[in-house]
Image (cartoon, helix red, strand yellow):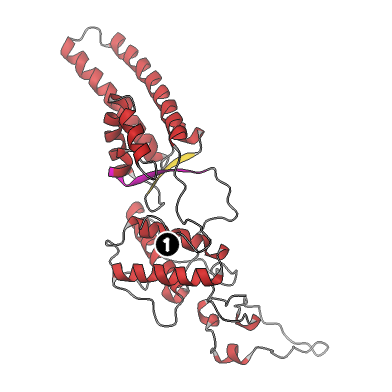
């Protein structure tokens, strides 16, 4: 599942970079690397003139590997997928699911890039990019990465909203190894853009993605929980695991979510076919005010649904019905 198209013809996927921009970025990286390689080689030749030919050959090979192979791998790892050329042209290397790359991804891309870029002058990389539907070269295919465009106009910040508090940490024992990267990408893109979709389309897409995720994890959305809330809970559980693995326990409370996110309306998926009731919306708690004789406290006008907790259940989950 590498692509998901809504009823409004909106493709929920990252925007792959085109071959011309990628070629120019690689060319800029190669020019910088070759300049550094020549300078380092001249310095080493002058410094090791007294050594024998075998030692000089070993130093030449080591210099080639460090400057033209090791340096690009280190730069991509430390910059999370943005080399000098990619930074200049607004590109970035990401995983298939949209997350940042790590050392193993950069290592595979750099090792295969020696063959398809340096040894073949980029011919193999160009052919692979033209054949691939997403413009990926062989290094991207084996590493599970994708070069995407960063400088694109966006209407809203693409932030995955937090799930309801009662679902936080509920899927801590869930096995997520069977979920493909394409499904993670579709879920992430849906959660970041569900507010821009029609309520009917958003509801149907949430059910379809939740069914796909349940089939691969064995976990089903709890009774009465919106499918989008289930998707957000599983995505945040995966992010929490990656944070704990990356920082080796230094991130305390990686699965916790900021207080007041629901009062601020950060996560409000909509269910179709239900009228909007202003009383169902979660309002932030106000500090108690003491009633003075001149200004008595106003009586509560809460609806029966909110008083009893029945109806849509938005008072407990933070969801509001559609307009």
Q: Position of residue 32 (x, y in %)?
A: 42, 23
Q: Report the span colored magenta.
A: 142-150
Identify whether 273 is placed above or below 153: below
Count of numbered marks:
1
Q: Is residue 81 left or right of residue 176?
A: right
Is residue 178 visible in the rendered image? The answer is yes
Identify whether 294 is placed above or below 101: below
Instruction: State which quadrant residue 196 falls in.
Output: bottom right
For the point 52% across and 64% down, which residue is it? 194
For the point 51% across and 58% down, which residue is it? 9
For the point 35% across and 35% down, which residue is it? 74
Query: In terms of secondary structure, where does tag 1 sit?
Result: helix
Q: Position of residue 3 (x, y in %)?
A: 41, 56
Q: Pick whichever, 311 or 11, lies toward us.
A: 11
Quarter of the image where the N terminus is located: bottom left
Is residue 173 visible in the rendered image? The answer is no
Would residue 90 be counted in the magenta stretch?
A: no
Q: Position of residue 12 (x, y in %)?
A: 46, 57
């Amino acid at each position: 599942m590498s692509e998901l198209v809504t009823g409004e013809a909106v493709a929920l996927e990252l925007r792959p970079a085109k071959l011309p921009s990628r070629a120019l970025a690689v060319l800029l990286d190669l020019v910088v690397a070759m300049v550094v390689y020549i300078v380092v080689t001249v310095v080493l030749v002058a410094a090791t003139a007294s050594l024998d030919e075998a030692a000089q050959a070993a130093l030449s090979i080591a210099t080639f590997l460090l400057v033209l192979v090791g340096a690009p791998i280190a730069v991509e790892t430390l910059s999370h997928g943005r080399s000098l050329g990619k930074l200049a042209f607004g590109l970035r290397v990401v995983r298939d699911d949209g997350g940042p790359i790590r050392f193993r991804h950069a290592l595979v891309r750099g090792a295969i890039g020696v063959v398809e870029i340096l040894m073949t002058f980029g011919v193999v990389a160009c052919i692979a990019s033209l054949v691939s539907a997403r413009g990926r070269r062989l290094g991207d295919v084996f590493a599970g990465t994708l070069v995407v465009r960063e400088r694109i106009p966006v209407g809203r910040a693409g932030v995955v909203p937090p799930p309801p508090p009662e679902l936080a940490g509920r899927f801590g024992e869930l096995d997520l190894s069977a979920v493909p990267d394409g499904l993670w990408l579709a879920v992430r893109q849906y959660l970041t853009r569900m507010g821009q979709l029609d309520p009917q389309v958003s509801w149907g897409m949430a059910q379809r993605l939740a069914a796909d995720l349940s089939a691969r994890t064995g976990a089903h959305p709890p009774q009465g929980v919106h499918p989008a809330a289930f998707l957000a809970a599983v995505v945040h559980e995966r992010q929490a695991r990656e944070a704990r693995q990356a920082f080796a326990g230094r991130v305390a409370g990686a699965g916790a979510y900021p207080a007041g996110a629901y009062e601020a309306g950060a996560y409000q998926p909509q269910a179709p076919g239900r009228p909007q009731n202003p009383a169902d919306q979660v309002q932030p708690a106000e500090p108690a005010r003491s009633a003075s004789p001149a200004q008595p406290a106003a009586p509560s006008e809460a609806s029966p649904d909110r008083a009893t907790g029945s109806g849509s259940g938005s008072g407990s989950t933070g969801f509001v019905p559609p307009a």
